[in-house]
Image (spheres, rainbow, N blue to C red):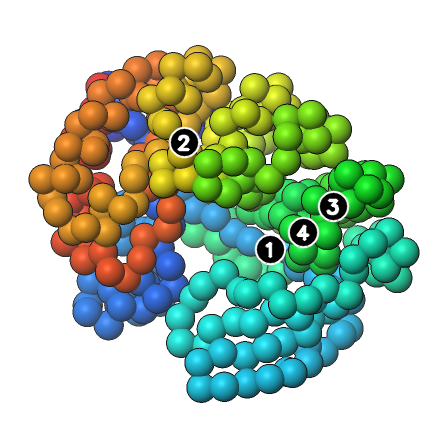
């Protein structure tokens, strides 16, 4: 088959149609981008998606902090970290020297009553929540390079926990279910409303890339029954909105989510990403059970890539790519973002060898 453009290739993969090779996407931490740029591997100001020849590019245009007018308060600062209270009423400690997930210190919203103080901020779609300029810039870049363009956002689970934390949210599912149901509904409605405003003005993307980390190591955050009750209806609502506009949906979830997969597939998602091996996921098992229903992106153990051992990388790729490329539904991606400990030469080898194995 003649070589396809990135947008053609990803579109076909999401529909399990024939392609010339598997797709290619990857995430690099900001620290990695800075290191590669300093080393001369990336051009200053040029998106790494272009330099690496990826098939897909994203844009995160939305701001979901509850109180947009709240000025973050610095509560404590050291040489290494900074403790901030944000517009969600959340107290978070962030590292100043490198990118990392913030430490969750405290949350003002711990129950239904607390939620009611913040709920009014999220009922109407304020245009200040939308970065129209960045969306336009990234969409034009995708068109210029014939890449599949995704509008990215957290979905309901990832939108709720910044305001109340995982612990209070999960306890709420058991003790105050009406609170969690209301939060999920409010955030789903706000997400859809902001998308409608943005897309009416700037045009639709090729895909939605939703992020909802539903698991941790060896277990999901909730039972399948709780997923079906609290999260699935709103996943389905946002996916159905996308499909009503002719837009495909890629759903990201870190952690072990195998027990939830049958129900996630039922929401209508077109692709699952990232299939985290170190959390207990098994790419080949997921492909066998669901590869005829959805496309897959990821599932290549990032620990092998960070070893910078090309023989180990070749073994990892050779054991998986020839199998998961069957059915024209796979996009090459690690099971996590690429840290700066991965040399640029290693990253290039991973990509080139993966695509070589992924030719049809």
**Which residue is depicted at the point 64% across and 83% down?**
74
Query: Which mark is in front, 1 or 4?
Result: 4
In the picture of the structure, the residue carrying the numbered disc 2 is 281
Alpha-carbon neighbours of circle 4 within 10 Å: few (<14), some, or many (≥20)?
Answer: few
Residue 61 badge: 1
Do callouts 3 and 1 mark residues in contact (Cβ within 8 Å)?
no
Question: Circle 1 sits in a helix, a strand or a loop, which is it?
Answer: loop
**Which residue is depicted at the point 40% across and 71% down?**
98
Q: CA distance from mark 2 to mark 4?
A: 23 Å
In the picture of the structure, the residue carrying the numbered disc 4 is 167
Specify the quadrant that holds the C terminus: top left
**Which residue is depicted at the point 68% across and 81% down?**
73
In the picture of the structure, the residue carrying the numbered disc 3 is 171
Question: Circle 3 sits in a helix, a strand or a loop, which is it?
Answer: helix
Can you give x and y, in whole percent of width and height, for residue 191 in the image?
Answer: 71, 45
Query: Which mark is in front, 3 or 1?
Result: 3
Question: Vertical placement of 57 versus 277: above or below?
Answer: below
Do callouts 3 and 4 mark residues in contact (Cβ within 8 Å)?
yes
Towards the viewer: 29 or 174: 174
């Amino acid at each position: 088959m003649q070589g396809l453009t990135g947008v053609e290739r990803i579109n076909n993969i999401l529909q399990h149609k024939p392609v010339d090779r598997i797709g290619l996407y990857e995430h690099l931490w900001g620290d990695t981008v800075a290191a590669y740029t300093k080393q001369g591997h990336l051009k200053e100001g040029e998106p790494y998606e272009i330099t690496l020849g990826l098939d897909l590019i994203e844009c995160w245009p939305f701001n979901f902090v509850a109180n947009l007018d709240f000025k973050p308060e610095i509560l404590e600062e050291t040489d290494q970290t900074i403790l901030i209270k944000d517009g969600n009423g959340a107290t978070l400690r962030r590292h100043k020297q490198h990118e990392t997930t913030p430490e969750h210190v405290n949350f003002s919203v711990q129950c239904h009553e607390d939620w009611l103080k913040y709920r009014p901020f999220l009922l109407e779609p304020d245009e200040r929540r939308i970065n129209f300029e960045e969306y336009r810039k990234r969409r034009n870049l995708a068109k210029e390079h014939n890449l599949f363009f995704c509008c990215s956002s957290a979905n309901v689970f990832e939108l709720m926990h910044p305001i109340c934390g995982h612990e209070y949210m999960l306890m709420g599912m058991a003790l105050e279910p009406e609170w969690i149901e209301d939060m999920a509904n409010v955030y789903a409605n706000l997400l859809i409303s902001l998308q409608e405003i943005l897309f009416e003005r700037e045009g639709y993307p090729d895909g939605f890339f939703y992020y909802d980390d539903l698991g941790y190591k060896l277990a999901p955050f909730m039972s399948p029954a709780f997923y079906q009750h609290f999260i699935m209806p709103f996943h389905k609502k946002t996916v159905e909105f996308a499909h009503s506009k002719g837009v495909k949906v890629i759903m990201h979830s870190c952690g072990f989510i195998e027990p939830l997969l049958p129900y996630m597939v039922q929401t209508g998602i077109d692709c699952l990403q990232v299939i985290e091996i170190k959390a207990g996921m098994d790419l080949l098992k997921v492909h066998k059970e669901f590869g005829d229903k959805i496309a897959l992106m990821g599932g290549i153990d990032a620990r092998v890539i960070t070893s910078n051992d090309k023989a180990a990388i070749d073994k990892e790729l050779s054991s998986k790519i020839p199998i998961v490329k069957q059915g024209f539904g796979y996009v090459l991606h690690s099971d996590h973002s690429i840290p700066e400990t991965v040399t640029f030469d290693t990253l290039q080898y991973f990509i080139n060898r993966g695509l070589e194995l992924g030719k049809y």
